[in-house]
Image (cartoon, helix red, strand yellow):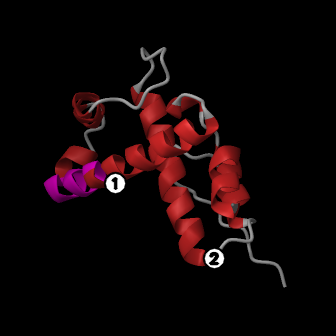
Amino acid sequence: MTEPTFVDNSENSPLSKEDINLISLTNLSISEKHHLRMLAHCLQCFKSMSKKNHGGLIPVKEEWLEWCLENPLMLQDDEFVQVMFEQFAGAANQLERLSNDLKIAPLDLTLSNLIEAYRA
């Protein structure tokens, strides 16, 4: 029996429906898929923050804050922003480690790179 595909109907998600479905179709455990979605979500957020960043580096925390200020829905809940920053910090570390292993800039990572890292 195949696992049903998950389609995120949120128009505000940085992940495309195709990305979410691709993750759901992997042979990873449910918790690994969740973590992979979170990491991919953070990567896409970092990419959207870094339109001026041509070096492909993870944005600094000041850029995280600027990005949040441009997204007023997030500012309605201070605790949410705090948790998001914690998630960003953890994701930044993981993405930097993976990019070092692959010898590419962190923001040049793709969903395929993340999936392969989980499979390894």
Instruction: Tell me: 16 left or right of 68.
Output: right
Decide: is 99 above or below 86: above
Task: Indicate the quadrant containing the C terminus: top left, top right, bottom left or bottom right.
Answer: bottom right
SS class, disc 1: helix
| Magenta extent | 77-85
Decide: is 40 above or below 52: below
Density class for disc 1 (Cα within 10 Å; few <14, some 14-19, many ≥20) is some
Residue lying at the far bottom in this picture: please name it: 1
Q: Quadrant of residue 46?
A: top left
Q: Nearer the viewer, residue 1 or 61?
A: 61
The stretch drawn in magenta includes residue 25: no
Residue at image position (28%, 28%) is 63
Instruction: Tell me: 87 left or right of 3.
Output: left
Decide: is 64 above or below 41: above
Residue 81 point in image, percent of width and height: 22, 50
Q: Report how far apart the C-alphas of labels 2 and 1 lie in the structure.
A: 20 Å
Residue at image position (42%, 24%) is 50
- Which residue corresponds to mark 1? 87
Residue 22 point in image, percent of width and height: 72, 56
* Dominant secondary structure, magenta: helix
- Mark before the other along the chain sequence, 2 or 1: 2
Q: Nearer the viewer, residue 1 or 54?
A: 54
Q: Amino acid at mark 2?
A: Ser
Q: Amino acid at mark 1?
A: Gln
Residue 113 point in image, percent of width and height: 67, 45
Residue at image position (67%, 60%) is 23
The stretch drawn in magenta includes residue 84: yes
Residue 25 point in image, percent of width and height: 75, 65
Q: Is residue 12 visible?
A: no
- Which residue corresponds to mark 2? 29
Q: Quadrant of residue 83?
A: bottom left
